[in-house]
Image (cartoon, rainbow, N blue to C red):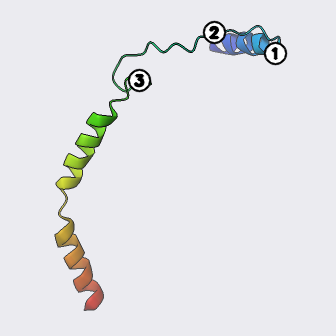
């Protein structure tokens, strides 16, 4: 069924008959109409805050110096 659909769309495009809508009506989380970038950024900052970069950087420095 999907292959047939691709063939039909391809034919419609080739014949200049393909029509589409640019209206976006996607509302579920993560969809193009609702990316939730603010929430993703907040969650990323929370995850990064849990890392102990100072300790890791000190350990690396000690390894490289000694």
Which residue does the numbered mark 2 point to in the structure image?
Answer: 1
Q: Is residue 49 placed above or below 9 in the rendered structure?
A: below
Mark toward the start of the polypeptide (1 vs 2): 2
Q: Residue furthest bottom?
A: 66
Q: Residue visible at 80% across and 11% down?
A: 16
Q: Residue visible at 21% across and 66% down?
A: 53
Residue 32 image-quadrant placement: top left
Res. 44 mark = none
Of residue 8 and residue 36, the one placed in the foreground of this image is: 36
Indicate the quadrant containing the N terminus: top left, top right, bottom left or bottom right. top right
Q: Judge left or right: residue 15 versus residue 46.
A: right
Distance from disc 3 to disc 1, alpha carbons, whole Å, reads: 29 Å
Neighbour tally class for label 2: few under 14, some 14-19, many 20 plus, Cα within 10 Å: few
Mark toward the start of the polypeptide (3 vs 1): 1
Q: Judge left or right: residue 63 versus residue 21.
A: left
Q: Nearer the viewer, mark 2 or mark 3?
A: 3
Residue 43 lies, in percent from the top left, at 23, 41
Which residue does the numbered mark 3 point to in the structure image?
Answer: 31
């Amino acid at each position: 069924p999907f292959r047939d659909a691709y063939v039909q769309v391809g034919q419609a495009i080739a014949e200049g008959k393909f029509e589409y809508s640019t209206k976006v009506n996607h509302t579920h989380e993560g969809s193009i109409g609702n990316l939730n970038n603010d929430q993703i950024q907040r969650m990323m900052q929370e995850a990064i805050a849990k890392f102990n970069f100072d300790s890791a950087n000190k350990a690396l420095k000690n390894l490289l110096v000694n």
